[in-house]
């Protein structure tokens, strides 16, 4: 009876919501202009708004003149005071939750404020819209006849104020979900929010092995670990023998391409669908329109005002920053957001490219700090992940995870790139894999190709295949198991790769 009521409510919501989604996508400039003015009106009643004269802001140009582009370091004084219990510094409603994400140069962790408005109008709306778009594409889906598996992180009380909480974004969301979601999800919250990831993995496996799971949300690496454990527990050959009605995997956080073959092996079905989302600690930004579409829709009506900085402008004193109507397809932009949680002109560190503007579709190209540019090669994560996926296809190998770093020039030796790769299925010849990786990088990146000429500046990549579990142990040592934590795949120095060496 309860499930029937929930399904009726969902059907009503999807029918009501789809015209709203289409309106926001078809009227993006109008929608964004309205959100901008709503945010400024809210920001007037904050300390940040007072310091930056929000009451004088009448246009986006005024806003850009009054408020420099921000990052975590510039907003940290306001955030730290909020963590200690002060309110209305960045946003006019009370902040009780913080999404904890990987840290900056001076901090182990960042604490991103999460307001009631950002939960309701952004995070929850985004989650419902994924299902709305999916059901629009597959009206005969039986996704709600079973349960959704949520693989998330944990939360804890903020040590600076007992009335505030912090945790992985997934944990923040799980703690605030409406009751009806719990009727359609597994495992129970006391398991889903466990802090010890190794213990939690076992508990999730035990709790879900006999459930009728129809859809899964989670980061690929941790989802694959769960699959492995479930097959060990049951002796089954694939996940469809455990969950025969599984039809949808919703993923985000990392490029899915290197994991696709592994998922196909675990879930050998043409009826299995995969939808990418762009759901960060700072907000829910993008949804793949349907499983076969290229790129993600930029969601316009989630209480977020978007700006875009061409990556060539990063680091300049007065960088050029544009709004949605001026973006160009194929240009790499750093994403800047103003949100209904009080992040004002905040550069989140991700870079994107648009593939279309009617409606606005994009894909994530990497991080503003996730690259190797020691020799002028400008190797971005977009190139690295695409090249390694193609090299795996050429050598009939399967990759679990990797990290890469520069090898510095020496007096009598060229520099280069060093790759530590954990394979699910190792190539027959690592040297041939390195050659294929090099060829693909040359094809994808003209700067890399130029620097490789004659082995003068950059030599052939050095590739090491590590034993299973190396990256897992490194993450465990760092206290970053589970949730949205992942191995940094490119570094412009050798700090991370030298740390990982200790686990080889």
Image: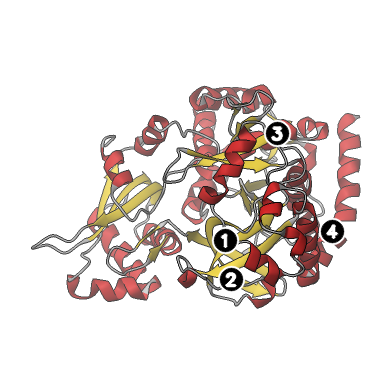
Is residue 424 or residue 380 the one in the foreground?
380
Q: Is residue 240 visible?
A: no
Q: Are marks 2 and 1 in contact (CB under 8 Å)?
A: yes
Residue 81 picture location, percent across and down? 61, 37
- The quarter holding residue 24 reads bottom right
Q: Are marks 4 and 1 in contact (CB under 8 Å)?
A: no
Q: Which mark is residue 145?
A: none
Look at mark 1 in the image and give the residue it sits on: 69
Look at mark 3 in the image and give the residue it sits on: 96
Q: Residue at x 53, y 42 (%)?
A: 266
Q: Residue at x 54, y 30 (%)?
A: 230
Q: Badge 4: how crowded within 10 Å, few (<14), some, or many (20+)? A: some
Going from N to C along the chain, the mark reached first, 2 or 1, is 1
- The quarter holding residue 298 reads bottom right
Look at mark 4 in the image and give the residue it sits on: 18
Question: In 3D space, how far apart are the residues under numbered discs 4 and 1 (Cα atoms)?
Answer: 34 Å
Q: Is residue 325 left or right of residue 3?
A: left
Question: Mark 2 falls on what kind of element?
Answer: loop
Going from N to C along the chain, the mark reached first, 2 or 3, is 3
Going from N to C along the chain, the mark reached first, 4 or 3, is 4
Question: In 3D space, how far apart are the residues under numbered discs 2 and 1 (Cα atoms)?
Answer: 9 Å
Q: How is the image coloured?
A: secondary structure
Q: Badge 3: how crowded within 10 Å, few (<14), some, or many (20+)? A: many
From the viewer's perspective, is residue 258 above or below residue 106? below
């Amino acid at each position: 009876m309860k499930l029937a009521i929930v399904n009726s409510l969902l059907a009503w919501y999807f029918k009501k919501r789809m015209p709203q989604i289409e309106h926001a996508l078809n009227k993006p400039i109008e929608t964004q202009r309205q959100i901008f003015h709503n945010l400024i009106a809210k920001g007037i009643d904050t300390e940040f708004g007072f310091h930056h004269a929000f009451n004088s802001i009448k246009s986006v140009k005024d806003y850009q003149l009054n408020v420099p582009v921000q990052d975590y370091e510039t907003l940290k004084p306001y955030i730290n005071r909020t963590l200690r219990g002060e309110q209305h510094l960045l946003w006019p409603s009370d902040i009780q939750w913080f999404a904890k994400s990987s840290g900056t140069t001076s901090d182990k962790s960042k604490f991103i404020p999460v307001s009631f408005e950002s939960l309701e109008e952004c995070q929850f709306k985004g989650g419902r819209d994924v299902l709305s778009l999916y059901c629009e594409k597959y009206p005969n889906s039986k996704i709600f006849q079973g349960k959704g598996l949520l693989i998330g992180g944990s939360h804890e009380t903020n040590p600076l104020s007992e009335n505030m909480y912090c945790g992985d974004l997934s944990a923040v969301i799980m703690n605030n979900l409406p009751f009806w979601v719990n009727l359609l999800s597994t495992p129970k919250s006391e398991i889903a929010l466990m802090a010890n990831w190794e213990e939690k993995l076992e508990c999730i496996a035990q709790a879900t092995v006999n459930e009728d799971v129809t859809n899964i949300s989670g980061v690929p690496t941790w989802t694959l670990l769960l699959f492995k454990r479930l097959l060990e527990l049951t002796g089954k050959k694939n996940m469809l023998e455990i969950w025969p009605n599984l039809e949808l995997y919703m993923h985000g956080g990392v490029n899915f391409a290197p994991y696709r073959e592994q998922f196909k092996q675990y879930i050998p079905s043409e009826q299995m669908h995969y939808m990418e989302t762009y759901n960060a600690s700072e907000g829910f930004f993008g949804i793949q329109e349907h499983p076969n579409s290229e790129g993600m829709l930029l969601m316009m009506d989630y209480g977020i005002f978007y700006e875009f900085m061409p990556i060539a402008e990063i680091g300049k004193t007065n960088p050029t920053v544009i709004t949605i109507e001026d973006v160009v397809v194929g240009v790499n932009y750093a994403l800047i957001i103003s949100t209904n949680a009080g992040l004002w002109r905040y550069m989140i560190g991700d870079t994107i490219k648009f593939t279309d503007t009617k409606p606005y579709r994009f894909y994530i190209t990497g991080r503003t700090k996730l690259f190797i540019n020691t020799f002028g090669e400008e190797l971005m994560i977009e190139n690295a992940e695409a090249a390694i996926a193609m090299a795996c296809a050429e050598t009939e190998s399967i990759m679990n995870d990797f990290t890469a770093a520069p090898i510095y020039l020496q007096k009598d030796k060229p520099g280069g790139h060093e790759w530590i790769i954990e394979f699910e299925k190792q190539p027959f010849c690592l040297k041939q894999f390195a050659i294929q990786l090099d060829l693909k990088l040359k094809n994808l990146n003209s700067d890399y190709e130029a620097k490789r000429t004659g082995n003068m500046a950059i030599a052939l990549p050095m590739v090491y295949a590590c034993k299973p579990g190396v990256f897992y142990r490194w993450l465990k040592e760092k206290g970053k198991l589970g949730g949205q934590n992942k191995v940094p795949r490119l570094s412009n120095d050798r700090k991370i790769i030298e740390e990982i060496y200790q686990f080889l």
